[in-house]
């Protein structure tokens, strides 16, 4: 215990950043709650888990807002959020014994406790991700001041505060698991890396687009004999055990058939329902098409929009693999690659939602404080992401905000979308230069 005061004294700035950013996000818990459709869906999932039980949770058809469309970890998160709120009387019992927490907080929790618990995974994801960004920057640069600034830029970024504190989305938690899996590949604890990429994908499969990059890094380290067979065996075994533990309450002993069922009947239909050229993301397709109107099969540039997106993503991966083959694999090159693939996938793939643009955001946040010439791209991307989130969140409630973006033939949407694409191209050129056009997957 003697080490704790010393740690607080040494890292007090980090603890201040965490505490203040946590309070800022909690401030928004009881704000704008009634206009978040997603929060109503999450509330229903959390409540009905206990009403119908986990075995019937994914098979029941009697849902008011939406049947479960996310993997079991997400369902368990919201179920436990309701459990904590439903047992709020424990706070009063604790207060009677030790006079903590304060009575005012108990009253507040009685009114807004469920909303707080539903938003807490995203809020805690932000805190954890901010700390991980600190670790990334410090390991890349060796500069504690840059790492601290990078952590602050993320924790007090308007886009991240809005996404978790106001909207209550879990993108930051998913990103924390995913980013940690890449970080662990470069450490002596790489055996834990597969477990955390599993947590990311089995919470919400948004990071599936980065999975080929993860596999490439894993194989690269295997070839270089930096990832030993016993470490891979440990990681796969731990992941399989976690899969069984998390899935069994919903599936019983039929884990494989259950996973197949929810993938085909719950998750894929939800994804297909949003397969438009662009749903609500300001990306490449919204320069030409209308938001949430044109289908992904609508053609332009001599091919359907979805095939064009796949082609560009495949080319992006070729660029990244060529870059890694030439530069080698370390935390900096992994971060550059993650930023290129994450940012690029959401700009060019079809059916993208506004919050999926967050996919490349943590990587670019790291690079912004690791290389000064890249800071401007982070600033631009923050502005465009935040504007996209504001429009998507408020467009159905406040006509003035919607008209600001969509009047005059979606003029502002198309301008922001063009800025996003241009920023991405310049970002890629700044990081991999000539590899943008000349792909070399092997050395001569």
Image (cartoon, rainbow, N blue to C red):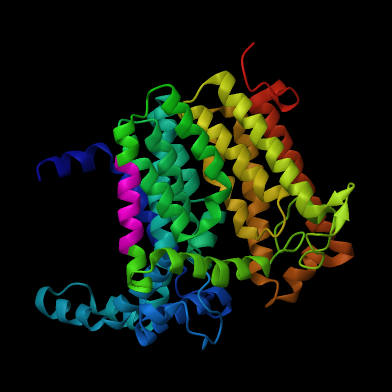
Q: Can you tell which quarter of the image residue 83 is in?
A: bottom left
Residue 116 x, y percent position in the rendering? 39, 72
Residue at x-position 17% and y-position 38%: 6
Q: Nearer the viewer, residue 415 or 220?
A: 220
Residue at x-position 29% and y-position 34%: 230
Residue at x-position 60% and y-position 34%: 375
* Extreme residue toward the top, this view: 444
Residue 151 x, y percent position in the rendering? 44, 42
In-image side of 29 versus 348 (left or right)? left
In-image side of 319 versus 143 (left or right)? right
> Does the magenta run of residues contain 65?
no
Whether residue 426 is situated above or below residue 383 in the rendered picture: above
Q: Nearer the viewer, residue 12 or 176?
A: 176
Magenta region: 234-245
Residue 135 x, y percent position in the rendering? 38, 36
> Does the magenta run of residues contain 237?
yes
Whether residue 323 is situated above or below residue 335 in the rendered picture: above
Residue at x-position 48% and y-position 84%: 60
User: If the image is split into quadrants, where does the C terminus sit?
Assistant: top right
In-image side of 439 versus 137 (left or right)? right
Q: Can you tell which quarter of the image residue 277 is in?
A: bottom right
Mark yes or no: residue 13 visible: no
Task: Give the overall secondary structure of the magenta segment.
Answer: helix
Q: Can you tell which quarter of the image residue 43 is in?
A: bottom left
Q: How many labels does the image show?
A: 0
């Amino acid at each position: 215990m003697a080490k704790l005061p010393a740690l607080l004294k040494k890292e007090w700035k980090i603890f201040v950043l965490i505490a203040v950013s946590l309070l800022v996000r909690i401030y928004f818990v009881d704000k704008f709650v009634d206009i978040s459709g997603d929060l109503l869906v999450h509330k229903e999932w959390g409540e009905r888990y206990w009403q119908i039980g986990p075995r019937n949770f994914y098979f029941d058809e009697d849902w008011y807002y939406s049947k479960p469309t996310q993997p079991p970890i997400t369902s368990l998160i919201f179920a436990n959020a309701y459990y904590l709120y439903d047992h709020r009387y424990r706070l009063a019992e604790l207060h009677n014994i030790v006079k903590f927490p304060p009575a005012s907080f108990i009253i507040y929790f009685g009114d807004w406790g469920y909303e707080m618990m539903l938003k807490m995974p995203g809020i805690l994801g932000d805190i954890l991700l901010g700390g991980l960004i600190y670790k990334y920057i410090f390991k890349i640069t060796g500069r504690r001041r840059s790492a601290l600034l990078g952590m602050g830029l993320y924790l007090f970024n308007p886009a991240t505060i809005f996404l978790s504190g106001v909207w209550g989305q879990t993108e930051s938690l998913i990103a924390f698991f995913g980013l940690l899996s890449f970080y662990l590949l470069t450490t002596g604890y790489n055996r834990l890396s597969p477990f955390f990429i599993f947590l990311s994908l089995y919470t919400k499969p948004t990071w599936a687009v980065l999975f080929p990059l993860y596999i490439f890094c894993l194989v690269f380290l295997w070839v270089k004999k930096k990832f030993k067979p016993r470490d891979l065996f440990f990681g796969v075994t731990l992941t399989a055990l976690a899969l069984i533990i998390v899935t069994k309450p919903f599936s019983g002993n039929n884990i494989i058939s259950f996973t197949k069922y929810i993938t085909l009947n719950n998750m894929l239909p939800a994804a297909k329902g949003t397969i438009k050229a662009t749903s609500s993301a300001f990306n490449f397709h919204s320069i030409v098409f209308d938001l949430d109107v044109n289908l992904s099969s609508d053609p332009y540039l001599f091919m359907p929009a979805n095939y064009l997106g796949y082609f560009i993503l495949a080319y992006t991966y070729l660029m990244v693999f060529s870059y890694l083959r030439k530069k080698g694999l370390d935390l900096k090159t992994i971060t550059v690659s993650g930023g290129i693939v994450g940012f690029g996938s959401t700009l060019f793939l079809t059916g993208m939602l506004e919050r999926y643009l967050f996919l490349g955001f943590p990587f670019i946040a790291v690079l912004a404080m690791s290389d000064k010439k890249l800071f401007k791209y982070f600033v631009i991307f923050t502005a465009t992401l935040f504007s996209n989130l504001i429009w998507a969140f408020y467009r159905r409630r406040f006509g003035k905000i919607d008209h600001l973006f969509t009047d005059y033939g979606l003029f502002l949407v198309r301008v922001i979308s063009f800025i996003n694409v241009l920023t991405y191209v310049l970002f890629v050129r700044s990081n991999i230069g000539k590899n943008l056009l000349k792909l070399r997957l092997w050395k001569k």
